[in-house]
Image: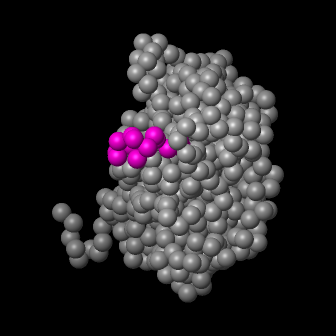
Amino acid sequence: MHNPAQGPLPERPHANPYLAGFCLGLVLLATFVVMGRGLGASGAFTTAVATAVHAVAPAHADGNDFYASYLGDGSSSPLEDWLVFEVLGVFVGGFLSGALANRLRFKVEKGPRIGTAPRLVLAAVGGALMGVGAKIALGCTSGQALTGGALLNVGSWAFMLCIFAGAYALAGLLRRAWL
Amino acid sequence: MIAPFFKFGAFGDEVSLVVAFVTGIAFGFTLERAGFGNARVLAAQFYFRDLRVLKVMFTAIVTAMIGTFLLGRLGVLDLSLVYLTPTFLVPQIVGGLVLGAGFIIGGYCPGTSCVSAATGRVDGMVYLLGMIGGLVGFAEIYPGIQGWLRTTPLGQVTLAQQFGLPYGMVVAAVAVMALGAFLAAEWAERRIGGKLPGPGSLLEPVRRITPVRAFALALLGLGLVAPFAGDPYRRGVAQLDAKQLALEAGTKADHVWPTELADWILQGRNDYRLIDVREPDEFATYHIPGAVNVPLTRVATDLAQRNELLVFVSDGGIHAAQAWLLFKAMGYRSVYMLFGGIEEWKEKVLFPVAPAADAPTSEQVEFRKRAAVAKYFGGAALGAGSAQAATRIVPPMPTSPPGDVVPAPARKKKKEGC
């Protein structure tokens, strides 16, 4: 038995990356077979943002083509959306896996040479860039790179290579944040 | 051909949301298992310390790619029905670079940040807030860059189509490239990151076929067989159930009556698609509100989901009937044609003729209703006995709806992409 005095249970090691990749590939394949579409993430947040803006300022949301395209036809709530439910599941699945592997922690993941506040500022900036980039490219790492990669989609492959290119190009400048 | 199940109508929208939730659980669980709830693990990719991102991502891509190829080739999965995001090359290159910058600055991508936040990581939660801010900002600049976002369109296109190669050849190339990338990644981890290849890696210093090597060889083997296995797409192969078709045609179950369609439009129904198969110039002269123009010569390409309700319209009825047969053959479930075509639409909806003065009251009531509908569609009711005139009148295109009949708003259905 675990003795609480020894502190939290040690985190279990992460899965073998090839095994995790194989499982992820099977999840993706199942989505193709069952739904005829792929996985996604950023689209759900766009729908949520569009719905929220529509609730606060309906005229503004309706007047903006970008929001309007995520609000549907008005016959049902825009939140009754495949990606929204999928992303809710991602939160649940991530939590379950984290709980089973003793990885649930309230903490900030950062390199040893950066403070908490600068790390959180970088997280917010990175998130904002990701939001913009995903909308320019019609998808993020899930919806474009992973899904389109497996379907040999031309745009997805160009996009995926550019993600790696962009991240590697800036990695040198951000060494302090991570190492 | 039975898959994709949803697009063949195996279940409806409500069930699809349950499927979405379950899929998401599996997705999130796998991402967390891989260590992707931790920004340090993800960022290590870009300093050659731990190339997990590349290994997980390419293993997943190769697994799903080979799976779709095999299922397509075996005739289980109709690959043409799996949604392919359209390519806009320059925006996607720029978007990729911006996303890459966001990845190394913030430490996550959208999917992994959800897992990170769900396991309590504060940086993941802040990242999500940042992303929401980015989306709001994007919406504000959207009108200004809207045109640019649709530049360099290549359509919904695969690498195989783009470069004129057999699909299987690209599958093999990606499998070989992925294996090469895995070996290079493990080499780089040792050389630059100083991490010795341990158990579970391809370069583990043992002289035997470890499980991970067997797995890699299996993927490579399947990939290399693909170029010789043929085409995974089903192209123009039609299957007909003659008895079933004869029954539907004979009982007129394949028809939508003009007055019925007019009521659908007035009710603002948007669960069907009205497809006008006439030539573009005829379509431009007059078409039923809400119709899209797909001339018969182009109609045999996939233009809708298998479970969508389609109504075909032509001048009389012959071209619509031909389109009906084509789509039935392609496996569409709910295909109908407008009975009598545009001609009948004009007679019954746009220019209904008043019944004789001694007709029963029910007929008179019905006519008054039809007259109001005709007015809405820009037509007019005609006096009794003027049936001959109807078909010669060129109906005007409807302008603004009159006050007495207000249709429900019909906005476009939501898109399928990210």
**Residue at the far top in the pictured view:** B243
B102 relative to B38 in the view: left or right: right
Does the magenta run of residues contain B378?
Answer: no
The residue at the point 22 percent across, 74 percent down is: A4
**Residue at the far front in the pictured view:** B358
Q: Quadrant of residue B244?
A: top left
Query: In the rendered view, would you say B413 is above or below B315?
Result: below
Report the coloring of the rendering: one colour
The residue at the point 36 percent across, 61 percent down is: A92
B259 relative to B93 in the view: left or right: left
The residue at the point 69 percent across, 51 percent down is: B396
**Picture coordinates of residue B398 (x, y %)?**
65, 55
Q: How many marks?
A: 0
Q: Quadrant of residue B173?
A: top right
The residue at the point 62 percent across, 34 percent down is: B388
B106 relative to B18 in the view: left or right: right
The front one of A116 and B86 is B86
Does the magenta run of residues contain B363?
Answer: yes
Q: Which of the image's four quarters has the C terminus of chain B?
A: bottom right
Magenta range? B352-364
**Picture coordinates of residue B248 (x, y %)?**
43, 21
**Picture coordinates of residue B199 (x, y %)?**
48, 44
| Residue B51 visible to the viewer | no
Q: Quadrant of residue A115?
A: bottom right
**Residue at the far left in the pictured view:** A1
The front one of A2 and A14 is A14
Query: In the rendered view, would you say A3 is above or below B70?
Result: below
| Residue B246 visible to the viewer | yes
Secondary structure that dominates the magenta span:
loop
